[in-house]
Image: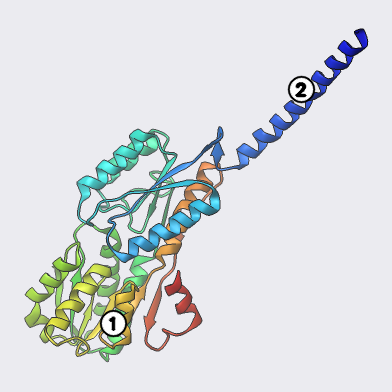
Amino acid sequence: MFRSALMLVCCVAVAAAMGCDQGDQKKGQEAKSPRAGGQTLRIAVIPKGTTHVFWKSVEAGAQKAGADLGVKIIWKGPLKENDRENQIKIVQQFVSDGVSGIVLAPLDDTALQGPVKSAMEKGIPVVIIDSALKGEAGKDFVSFVATNNRKAGAIGGEELARLMGAKGKAVLLRYTVGSASTDEREAGFLEVMAKNPDITMLVKDRYGGATVGESQKEAMNLLDKIKAADGIFCPNESSTFGMLLALRQNNLAGKIKFVGFDATPLLVDALKKSEVEALVAQNPTRMGYEGVKTLVAHLKGEKVAATVDTGVELITRGNLSTPAIQKLLAE
């Protein structure tokens, strides 16, 4: 009887010791894992809008990062890329819900400052993607993950100037007021145009708006200027496609040198048809992936870069079939 009781005590002691050891190991694993207290991290990813092909690629990248890193991605954004109030409400909603962190493409570089500040103060870190937010990366928000937009605009300007033989008349159809990413692209483009004294800007201060339809309408309003132009530049997907539709509607597609932005399937098809001469292409899939990856690394206590450049390429009919461009288009 005594011997049985003694053996039982010994077994309990061994089991307890093993349990403690396993508990210590588990705690160590949790410290290195993106899961805290057995709960998967919940990352809210908020785009500028949800209709453009560009954002669907960003979502694909974010979801892949979520799968690779074992975190839950919650994708939600306004329908149109001009609904600042709705985007602010979405940020505030996720802060109230207590998500682990937010990846945000701000519609306005000023209007979203307050919501981001509030999130950071409540311990919900924010990574900015695609379009800059006023403030200091690494302080006011965790990191800025995006295309070098000034460089991207300059690449478009250099290609258009080359196509025009560095002379003639050009049209810039801007995107929308308050969008830091396209503001930078437009500025980069105009800096290059200013270095070409024989190129005259017929239009440089008109905005297409947040949708393809709005951009098409504005291009139609500029038809007299467009007919007189030798070259056109548009700084994003919707302005490029809206301009293309207006050119097609007036039998001008392919007759004016046209450099656009973003390599969506419809725009690549227009490139193949010589309706567009070149496209400045971002890597939206990589942007979504790196945005989530950077936030998760921060949540795990790792040091992250204040800025992450996700790259930009110029796509022409000459390099369209190269492995590098095909890989970019496949992502």
Q: Is residue 51 left or right of residue 63?
A: left
Q: Indicate whether 234 appears above or below 168.
A: above
Could you tell me which residue is drawn at 21 percent across and 80 percent down? 232
Q: Is residue 96 left or right of residue 1?
A: left
Q: Which residue is mark 1?
A: 270
Image coordinates for residue 169, horizontal then vertical, percent: 17, 85
Q: Which residue is mark 2?
A: 16
Mark 2 Cα within 10 Å, few/some/many (few <14, many 20+)?
few
- Is there any visible trace of residue 236 in the rendered image? no
Q: How many marks?
A: 2
Q: Which mark is residue 209?
A: none
The answer to which quarter of the image holds residue 191 is: bottom left
Image coordinates for residue 13, horizontal then vertical, percent: 81, 19
Disc 1 is placed on an element classified as: helix
Q: Residue furthest top?
A: 2
Image coordinates for residue 168, horizontal then vertical, percent: 19, 89
Q: Indicate whether 172 appears above or below 72.
A: below
Q: Is residue 245 left or right of residue 131?
A: left
**Which of pointers 2 and 1 lies earlier in the amino acid sequence?**
2
Q: Nearer the viewer, residue 64 or 235?
A: 64
Q: Nearer the viewer, residue 155 or 86?
A: 86
Could you tell me which residue is drawn at 39 percent across and 38 percent down? 120
- Is there any visible trace of residue 206 in the rendered image? yes
User: Three-letter amino acid code at disc 2?
Assistant: Ala
Disc 2 is placed on an element classified as: helix
From the image, state whether disc 2 or disc 1 is nearer to you: 2
